[in-house]
Image (tube, rainbow, N blue to C red):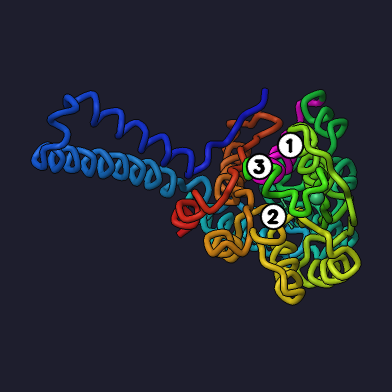
């Protein structure tokens, strides 16, 4: 069975919708306008929010007091600390594990330095130390089978995050009833949303030179990574599905890295000044692209369009300022909490589904502020 995480953003949107619903059903339209009634509704709303907050706090307190977790050891392998998105992810992961009752001293997070051999050594060490559960962001998704064999062989439950192992590998977990799961979002959705952000603007606007085609350059993350593959494919597919013609001017590998992308986009823009759209598989690379767009004297949303993925704070600020066309929120909060909850379920014997997904959120100037607020 596939389980899906619900993001805080969705929950707050649902709560707002529910509260709005309550307000209108409890008072006829004419009365709603009266200040006294409005004040009443506001009080009720505040009470409802306070109630919910109190219940949540209680639930957290109960779990936080969980003595079972205080002496459990968690090993966390991150593919590379020098990755903006994974830094947000691991910080939230650690804080949330502690809030759920783990002792900070029993949580060890290690940097794979983008080298599978290094990470494999770290996994061996965690096995020797006898950790109770492992959370792994593999350097190479293709190494997942050998990682799983090792970890399952040592009888340690395993939560994969962020870099999804392939379908054959995931099938082995359920076939063998292993304590292994994956927590992450489906990158096809983020790619599609990148394309839709442009489609929503309309072809008239995006086809700047009016030749009936969209001239674009693509800056990819690590091509071994399924997120990079899917975002590359599905961003363009969304344009084609909308009936737009596309013209790929350049496709380069920026390895998720800002400085690399900056250099690549500088080269691409000077070779292809007719570029209308720059697609970047993540925001770090979009920020690098923006530096080169600026340096080339171009203006986003006027003579070029730029989209990324992740909704890093800096990118959200650019979207608000109009210096980035849009991005896609890659919910590191829902994903890190989901990964920690999965680890807890393994440790307490509750078990997990084999796949725990979550939704991306399309971000443009219209909702960038609310995404930014939800991250504070
Ligand atoms: C993020 C990238 C990040 C990568 C690491 C992706 O989901 O969008 O920013 O570099 O994960 O694996
Ligand atoms: Ca064109």
Q: Is residue 156 above or below residue 305?
A: above
Tell me what residue is drawn at x 47 percent, y 48 percent: 67
| Image quarter in which the N terminus is found | top right
- Report the span colored magenta: 176-199
Horizontally, residue 63 falls left or right of residue 150, namely left
Tell me what residue is drawn at x 65 percent, y 63 percent: 87
Q: Residues within 10 Å of mark 3 (few under 14, many from 20)?
A: few
Instruction: Using the numbered discs, state the Cα–Cα distance from disc 3 to disc 1 in whole angstroms.
Output: 44 Å
Nearer to us of marks 2 and 3 is 3
Circle 1 residue: 180
Name the mark on residue 308: 2
Q: Residue most toward the bottom?
A: 295
Instruction: Using the numbered discs, state the Cα–Cα distance from disc 2 to disc 3 in whole angstroms.
Output: 18 Å
| Residue in the foreground of this view, choosing between 338 and 158 | 338
**What secondary structure is marked by label 1?**
strand
| Residue 187 appearing in the image | yes
What is the quadrant of residue 19 in the picture?
A: top left
Q: Residues within 10 Å of mark 2 (few under 14, many from 20)?
A: many
Nearer to us of marks 1 and 2 is 2
Lower position in the chain sequence, tag 1 or tag 2:
1
């Amino acid at each position: 069975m596939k389980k899906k995480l619900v993001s805080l953003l969705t929950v707050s949107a649902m709560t707002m919708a529910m509260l709005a619903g309550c307000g209108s059903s409890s008072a006829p339209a004419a009365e709603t306008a009266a200040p006294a009634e409005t004040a009443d509704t506001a009080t009720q709303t505040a009470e409802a929010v306070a109630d919910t907050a109190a219940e949540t706090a209680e639930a957290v307190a109960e779990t936080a007091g969980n003595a079972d977790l205080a002496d459990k050891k968690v090993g966390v392998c991150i593919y590379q600390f020098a990755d903006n998105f994974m830094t947000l992810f691991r910080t939230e992961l650690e804080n949330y594990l502690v809030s759920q009752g783990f002792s900070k001293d029993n949580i060890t997070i290690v940097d794979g330095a983008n080298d599978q051999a290094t990470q494999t050594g770290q996994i061996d060490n965690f096995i020797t130390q006898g950790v109770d559960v492992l959370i792994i962001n593999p350097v190479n998704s293709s190494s997942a089978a050998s990682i799983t064999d090792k970890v399952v062989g040592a009888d340690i439950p395993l939560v994969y995050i962020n870099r999804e192992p392939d379908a054959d590998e995931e099938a082995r977990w359920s076939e063998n009833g292993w304590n292994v799961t994956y927590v992450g979002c489906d990158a096809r959705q983020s790619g599609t949303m990148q394309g839709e952000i442009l489609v929503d603007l309309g072809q008239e606007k995006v086809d700047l030179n009016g030749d009936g085609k969209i001239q674009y350059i693509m800056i990819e993350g690590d091509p071994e990574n399924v997120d990079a593959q899917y975002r590359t494919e599905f961003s363009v597919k969304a344009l084609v599905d909308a009936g737009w013609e596309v013209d790929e001017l350049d496709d380069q590998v920026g390895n998720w890295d800002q400085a690399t992308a900056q250099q690549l986009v500088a080269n691409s823009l000077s070779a292809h000044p007719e570029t209308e759209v720059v697609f970047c598989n993540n925001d770090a690379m979009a920020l690098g692209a923006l530096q080169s767009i600026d340096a080339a004297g171009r203006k986003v949303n006027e003579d070029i369009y730029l989209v990324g993925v992740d909704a890093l704070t800096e990118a959200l600020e650019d979207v608000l300022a109009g210096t980035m066309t849009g991005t896609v929120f890659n919910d590191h909060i829902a994903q890190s909490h989901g990964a920690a909850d999965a680890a807890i379920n393994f440790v307490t014997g509750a078990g997990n589904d084999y796949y725990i997904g979550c939704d991306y959120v399309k971000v443009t100037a219209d909702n960038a502020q609310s995404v930014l607020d939800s991250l504070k």
